[in-house]
Image: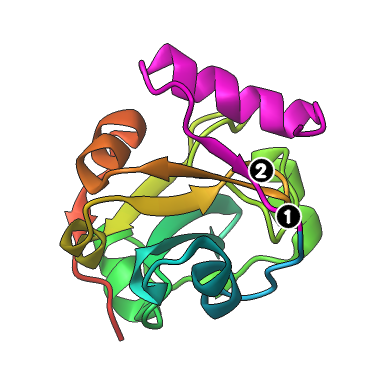
Amino acid sequence: MLTRNPALVTVENALTAAGLTDRMAELTEKVPSAAAAAEYLGCEVGAICNSIVFRAGDEAVLVLSSGAHRIDKAKAAVNFGVDKLSRADPEFVHAATGQRVGGCAPVGHPQPLRTLIDESLADYPHVWAGGGVSHAVFRITHDELVAITGAPSVDIRA
């Protein structure tokens, strides 16, 4: 049974509000990488949806990317309409999302974050995204990610 962490509950509430119920899965062992998560879940590494927070100046922005490749920060910056993106430190991520690095979800943040979705996530029938805590993930389709985040699906592959 999943621990009722406030970040997890917030993510579950966001999913439920979008009509996406019974999607959460508990991880009973640590999965420190997309490859480890894919092995644990029995899926391709590309079906792991990484939620990566970047800094665009003082603004937190979110990129939802496939675990199969790296993000081209210059492409992402252009899509956000900013000059450059830099990696956010764990404190900045927590302040922006209410979630810790290693469990960040695409939803359930105190305020909506401008978000981009890696178009290659559409190559999979469903993907697994962080559940707001390191020991939970949820199943979602690319189209559901677009709908729940309101984010565009773009080419951000390096």
Scheme of image coloration: rainbow
* Callout 2 secondary element: helix
Q: Amino acid at mark 1?
A: Phe
Q: Is residue 4 magenta?
A: yes
Which quadrant does the N terminus fall into?
top right
Residue at x 60%, y 76% (from the top left corner) = 36
Q: Amino acid at mark 2?
A: Ala
Identify the residue position indicated by label 1 in the image. 92
Residue at x 28%, y 44% (from the top left corner) = 141
Contact check, label 1 and label 2, Cβ < 8 Å: yes
Mark-to-mark CA distance, 1 and 2: 6 Å
Q: Is residue 120 magenta?
A: no
> Can you give x and y, in whole percent of width and height, for residue 111 in the image?
56, 28
* Callout 1 secondary element: helix
> Can you give x and y, in whole percent of width and height, for residue 38 in the image?
49, 70
Q: Over which residues does the magenta segment extend?
A: 1-28
How many labels were placed on the picture?
2
Is the residue 51 above or below the residue 77 in the image?
above
Question: Badge 1 local density, few (<14 within 10 Å), some, or many (20+)?
Answer: some
Q: Nearer the viewer, residue 152 or 103?
A: 103
Residue at x 55%, y 36% (from the top left corner) = 24
Identify the residue position indicated by label 2 in the image. 96
Q: Nearer the viewer, residue 36 or 64?
A: 36
Which quadrant does the C terminus fall into?
bottom left
Residue at x 33%, y 79% (from the top left corner) = 74
Q: Is residue 105 visible?
A: yes
> Can you give x and y, in whole percent of width and height, for residue 49 in the image?
43, 59
Question: Badge 2 local density, few (<14 within 10 Å), some, or many (20+)?
Answer: many
Is 119 left, or right, of 40 in this rendering? left
